[in-house]
Amino acid sequence: MLEIKDLHVSVDGNEILKGINLSVGTGEVHAIMGPNGSGKSTLSYILSGKDGYDVTAGSVTYEGKDLLEMETDERACEGIFLAFQYPVEIPGVNNTYFLKAAVNAKRKYQGLEELDAMGFMKLMKEKMPIVEMKQDLLTRSVNVGFSGGEKKRNEIFQMAVLEPKLALLDETDSGLDIDALRIVANGVNSLRNEERSMVVVTHYQRLLDYIEPDFVHVLSDGKIIKSGDKSLALELEDKGYSWLDKSA
Amino acid sequence: MSEVIEHYVSEHASLKDVLPGNDLSWLNESRDAALQQLSTQGFPTLRAEDWKYTSIRPIEKRQFKLAQEVGHSVDATSINGYLYKDLDCHLMVFVDGRFSAPLSNLGDLARGITIKDLSTALREDSDVLKTHLCSAADMTRNGFAAMNAAFMSDGAFIELDKNCVVDLPIHLMFLSTGQHEELTSQSRILILAGDNSQAKIIESYHAQQDSVYFNNITTEVKLGRNANLEHYKVQEESKKAFHVATLQVDQQRDSTFTSHSVSLGAQLARNDINSWMGDEGATCNLYGLYVADGRQHTDFHTRIDHAKPHCSSNEYYKGILDGHSRAVFNGQVHVHPDAQKSDAQQANNNLLLSKDAEIDTKPQLEIYADDVTAAHGATVGQLDENMMFYLRSRGIDYNSAHALLVYGFAHSVIEKMSLAPLRKHLESALVSRIPNAGQFSDMVED
């Protein structure tokens, strides 16, 4: 589904990613762990198309297409979803309306009929239990006045509604207390299926107790320095990131 | 005296006998003094600090005539398009600045409320008007204030007795027909809200045609103790019109005044909003939105005086400028030496959608007390990149995301309005005004 080959990325002339190779198959869940500043968020942003990142070498292929040639909204319509580490507040734009615009943009792209108010409400009702989404969060402006946990729930709720093929979860666990983490992780798990791939970027092993990955990769200084199964995450937790730096 | 001022002096001489209240000597004296003021002072020039960024040359270039009679071709059905859907209200309609009794519908008025047109009020309540008319608004402030005081050809008088709570909003609709060339209206509105009274008053300005005219309006508001007034102004004049308005508010102890002012129309619109909080515990909220494109020029000058302790003011203005439009915001807050425990908040945020649009924004806090909470901020810029990325990462294309964010920017002002029918009207107006926002017409709240 996703093929990253020798990807080099710079920001303002500083090389952040220094040759990433990663292959994500359909239905697989990959965890990418690493210390702060290792390039984890850069990887999420480059896959979703944020401005300000220069690809200096390498390629990213998504479902056989050159991902780096696609606009951000085109990628989303093709099934890529980024759950933000810091969800953006948008004053004055109603959360429900925003979601409806997103769902219909995607449906239009796919050549499907746009949902009317009724059809959309039905979809919302169906998805709300997944992250125990509260009604009042839907009537407010996007993420405005939401707690940290509510913002992350809103991200996973959007994911549930938009049904991506490839979900990128960028530090979805950061800053969450254990109750919020459970709700968010349960939401993610219920969205796991054989057709949906996920790349879970995290600093902490704790998230992987709830979302069990098929593969774990360790990112350090812009490179994947070690890959393995979920036991690698436990080993990392035990020994710390410095263990890898020494062994690398 | 310039040629244009001479024109208005001779207009005044020829109209003197037909202006409302011409049998009242105090009023004639006041009008004469104002005319004298206008003659000596003239209209403001760019040399005056308060008019530095707003040239009124296009007004000065023309010799506007005062409307003499109500336009007869306006019938009740043509008014319907300007009414706010689902808003029950006490309605007063002014056509080319003249009160139209047949088009107005005051409905059932509760005890303790008086709503009259200016001529009737000057006939029936001249003692009250003698005390209050021109007492809040200073006619020496500038030539436009003097001009209005000299001519005040029509308008409204609203009085709320002590403890009077008006359930329905009072809607003052000003419609310009464009049936005659270059007319001017010099309207005067006086609002006296007694102790503990409460009301919502709307001033709306509309045009039937894209014509040139000049509205010069003065609204005086006096709030008694603990009175609560929400004042709405929706300015949707013709894009060729000139609109100059002063809203002068005098607040007693524990009173709350809230202004929502939306400026969408006119080629040149200038709003002066001034509130004097003369006793403890008063609150003044000024909210505003201006949207301009083409060659429109819009100017908001506000001044809030914290004269006594424990008063609070909140100011929140937003502007969206496109094309070659230009806007001015000047927010003056004056905290007097006695006014300890004052809380003054002010924000002015502007979106520039084109490289030729221009904004001059100036927050101006003058604080002479030492125990005060105050904050102000002004921003000028384009849309936030992170917001754009967030929307686009959900599949919304660039143009649509842009439109949605511009709408959201404006909506955060509109959502402060408590009158839902007005919010709805303005949401529709924004959807049709903002480029590419038409697809979001279903966003307007039901």
Image (cartoon, coloured by chain):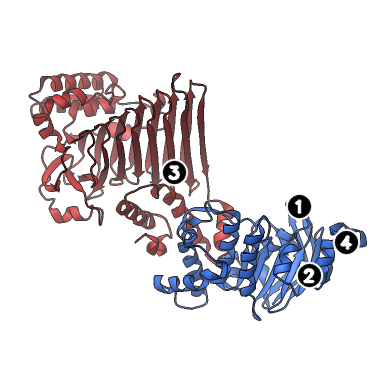
- The residue that disc 3 covers is B318
Q: Earlier in the sequence, mark 1 or mark 2?
A: 1
- The residue that disc 4 covers is A244
- The residue that disc 2 covers is A216
Q: Quadrant of the C terminus of chain A?
A: bottom right
Whether residue B270 is situated above or below residue B143 in the rendered picture: below
Figure chain in red:
B
Chain letter, disc 4 residue: A
Name the kind of residue labelled 3 in the image: Lys
Q: CA distance from mark 1 to mark 2?
A: 29 Å
Q: Earlier in the sequence, mark 2 or mark 4?
A: 2
| Cβ–Cβ under 8 Å for marks 3 and 1 | no
Q: Is residue B41 found left or right of A145 in the rendered image?
A: left
| The image quarter in which residue B435 lies | bottom left
State the residue lying farthest toward the front: A179
Label 1: state its secondary structure. loop
Of circles 3 and 2, the one toward us is 2
